[in-house]
Structure formats: C-alpha cells, structure tokens
Image (cartoon, rainbow, N blue to C red):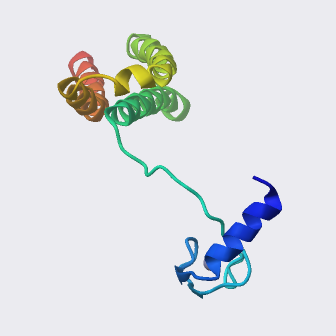
C-alpha cells in the first residue's frame, strides 16, 4: 500500500470517527488531520492481534524473574564484602552463578520453543503456566533456606 493511499484511507476513516485519542484520551470529533490536535500523536488505522497471555509468557516470566532473584542474591553477597569486608562465601555464590547461566540458557531455548509450547495440550499448558508463576518463589525459597541452614 502506498503511503499516500494509506494516508487517504486513514483520513477517510477519521472523517467519520468520534472517540478518544488512543494516546491522550482527548475526544476526537471527525478529525481532518492524521495527528491528534491535543497531543500530536500520529493517528493510523491498524489491524492488531490483541495480547493474549499464554503459558509460554508465564514461564518466560518465571525464568526472567528467577534470573533477577539470582542477580539480586549474588549482588547481596558481593555488597556484604564491599561494605563490611566480610569474606565472599563461594559455597553460596558459585551455585547462584551456575544457575544464573542455566537461566540465561533456559531463556534462550524457551524463546525458540514458543511454537512448540503453544501447540501443547491444555493440561500441559496449565502446568507450564503454573510452574512459571511458582518458579521465582520456589527458587528464592530454595536459596533462602540453603543460606539459613548453612549460615
Ligand atoms: Zn492525543
């Protein structure tokens, strides 16, 4: 579609449009320009697929949040060394570093497994989604209790 053709179709649509600007909410009444008169947002007609939270998204959330937990814990171990001069306990740091790498690799593979994960059955998707939500909580508790029990 030519740019001018798209622009004409947008103007034709907008000439009959009454409703809020998608960006600022300003009430548009048959705008004669493709820019919102209030905020200057470029108005255009699009066909969009609505966002659908899938089990793939939930598990990706779990991987990313768990990675964040690892980074947080490793940071705390090194900050204790930095602020208080306490020794770095490699018995706590190395497992975190190992799992940090595991989560990085996991995110990489999970990114490419999207089509596979979306083609799974209903129960498998439920299990993956639930595991994704629980993963950072499980991971944090595992690390926390290892820390408490070996302190
Ligand atoms: Zn606007």
Q: Is residue 55 above or below residue 41?
A: above
Quadrant position of ligand 1: bottom right
Question: What percent of the width, then of the height, locates residue 25?
Answer: 53, 79
| Identity of the residue furthest to the left in this view | 123
In this rendering, position of residue 122 left or right of residue 118:
left
Q: Is residue 66 above or below residue 29?
A: above
In this rendering, position of residue 20 left or right of residue 64:
right
**Residue 39, visible in the rendered structure:** yes
**Quarter of the image with the C terminus in it:** top left
Question: What percent of the width, then of the height, locates residue 38?
Answer: 67, 84
Task: Name the one closer to the observer, 8 or 134.
Answer: 8
Task: Name the one closer to the observer, 131 or 9.
Answer: 9
Q: Is residue 76 above or below residue 90?
A: below
Please name the residue shown 24% across and 32% down the image: 134
Question: What percent of the width, then of the height, locates residue 59?
Answer: 35, 30
Please name the residue shown 29% across and 25% down the image: 139
**Residue 41, visible in the rendered structure:** no
């Amino acid at each position: 579609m030519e740019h001018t053709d798209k622009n004409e179709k947008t103007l034709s649509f907008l000439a009959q449009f009454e409703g809020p600007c998608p960006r600022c909410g300003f009430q548009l009444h048959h705008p004669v320009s493709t820019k919102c008169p209030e905020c200057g947002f470029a108005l255009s007609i699009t066909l969009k697929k609505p966002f659908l939270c899938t089990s793939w998204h939930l598990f990706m959330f779990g991987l990313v949040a768990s990675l964040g937990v690892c980074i947080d814990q490793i940071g705390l171990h090194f900050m204790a060394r930095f602020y208080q001069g306490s020794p770095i306990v490699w018995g706590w740091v190395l497992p975190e570093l190992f799992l940090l790498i595991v989560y990085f690799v996991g995110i990489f593979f999970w990114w490419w497994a999207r089509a596979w994960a979306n083609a799974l059955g209903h129960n498998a998707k439920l299990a993956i989604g639930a595991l994704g939500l629980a993963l950072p909580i499980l991971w944090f508790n595992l690390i926390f209790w290892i820390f408490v029990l070996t302190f």
